[in-house]
Amino acid sequence: THEDYVIFDQVLNIICTIAKYKEEYIEVIIFNIIETLRKTKDLLKNRGTVIVTKLCNALKVDKIYSTFANVLLRMNDTDFVGRMINILDLFLLTAKDTEQLRSMLKNVKKSKEPKDKEFFEKIFRTWCINPVSSLILCLIAEYFELSYYLLIKLYIHFI
């Protein structure tokens, strides 16, 4: 119902505020959000993008993506993880909030910052659960050779 969504949004705003001022709780918060989304399939479908948007508005986008990657990588439910990565991927590709992250990923190969390469590797390990998302990530980061090998692997897999 509409009232449920209003309450949900209010709770999410409180959670984002806590995460903003107590960054040491971000992983716990995201873990609990992911567990709730996993247990409530309609919530993932109907509010997954809203949750990612609010978290990215409240905190640094790269921190949110990195934390999601850490938590999702430890999960055994690959079907759910794949759907969650789809949401993160779509948000990465289309949202104005992720513009800076896309720019960083685009320049990751040329970057002198080890943390940029580490970030890509962390995200990539998780994104590999969803082959199409890993391909998209490689294309954004301009890892064209890796994209080529992923395409070959996908092609062989689907023959």
Image (cartoon, helix red, strand yellow):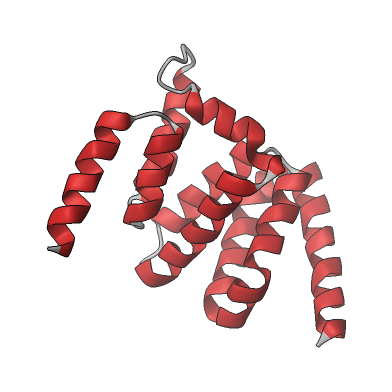
In the figure, 97 relative to 127: above or below? Answer: above
Residue drawn at 15 percent across, 60 percent down: 157
Residue 36 visible in the shown view: no
Residue reaching furthest to the top: 112
What is the tally of numbered marks visible in this picture?
0
Q: Nearer the viewer, residue 119 or 104?
A: 104
Q: Quadrant of the C terminus?
A: bottom left
Q: Nearer the viewer, residue 67 or 116?
A: 116
- Residue 122, given in percent of the width and then of the height, sits at 42, 39
In the figure, 159 relative to 144: above or below? Answer: below
Q: Quadrant of the N terminus?
A: bottom right
In the figure, 40 relative to 110: above or below? Answer: below
Residue 41 visible in the shown view: yes
- The quadrant holding residue 150 is top left
Residue drawn at 49 percent across, 27 percent down: 106
**Image position of 94 (left or right of 81):** right
Residue reaching furthest to the bottom: 1
- Residue 145, given in percent of the width and then of the height, sits at 25, 30
Residue drawn at 46 percent across, 35 percent down: 140
In the figure, 11 relative to 124: above or below? Answer: below
Residue drawn at 44 percent across, 42 percent down: 123
- Residue 79, given in percent of the width and then of the height, sits at 38, 71
**Image position of 150 (left or right of 128):** left
**Image position of 58 (left or right of 41):** right
Q: Nearer the viewer, residue 6 or 94?
A: 94
- The quadrant holding residue 109 is top left
- Residue 136, given in percent of the width and then of the height, sits at 41, 45
